Image (cartoon, rainbow, N blue to C red):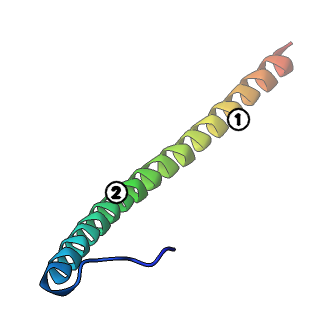
Amino acid sequence: MAALRFPPGRAGRTWLRERSAVAVSALSLLESKRALLEAESRRLRARQERTARDLELEERERDERVQTRRAGR
């Protein structure tokens, strides 16, 4: 990373404070986005697990119907 050049004296302090405030704001925004994405990830993972269970159940029920039909012939 290149050396950060900033104005000397009070102007430099003001410049650094503003950059620091922007960085803190950006960090806060990124943390909020991460929290939202983690929540969405948990929601989708739970949905995927429910769907997998539902598909398994449907497959078992289908297999049972097929077995019943074959046994009735």
The amino acid type found where label 2 is placed reads Lys
Q: Image height check: is 23 above or below 8?
A: above
70 left or right of 60? right
Within 10 angstroms of label 2, few (less than 14), some, or many (20 or more) residues? Answer: few
Instruction: Report which residue position mark 1 lands on.
Output: 60
Q: Quadrant of the C terminus?
A: top right
The amino acid type found where label 1 is placed reads Arg
Disc 1 is placed on an element classified as helix
- Who's the residue at 39% across and 77% down the image? 4
Q: Quadrant of residue 66?
A: top right
Asked whether 14 or 58 is in front, the reply is: 14
| Mark 1 vs 2, N-terminal side | 2
Asked whether 71 or 10 is in front, the reply is: 10
**Which numbered disc covers residue 33?**
2
18 left or right of 69? left
31 left or right of 17? right
Residue positioned most to the front: 8
Q: Quadrant of residue 13?
A: bottom left
Within 10 angstroms of label 1, few (less than 14), some, or many (20 or more) residues? Answer: few
- Who's the residue at 34% across and 55% down the image? 36
Given contact means CB atoms under 8 Å apart, are the residues at marks 1 and 2 in contact? Answer: no
Q: CA distance from mark 1 to mark 2?
A: 40 Å
Residue positioned most to the bottom: 9
Residue 34 x/y as whole percent: 38, 60
- Who's the residue at 85% across and 21% down the image? 71
Residue 40 x/y as whole percent: 40, 50
Disc 2 is placed on an element classified as helix
Asked whether 60 or 56 is in front, the reply is: 56
Residue 69 x/y as whole percent: 79, 17
20 left or right of 46? left
**Which numbered disc covers residue 31?**
none
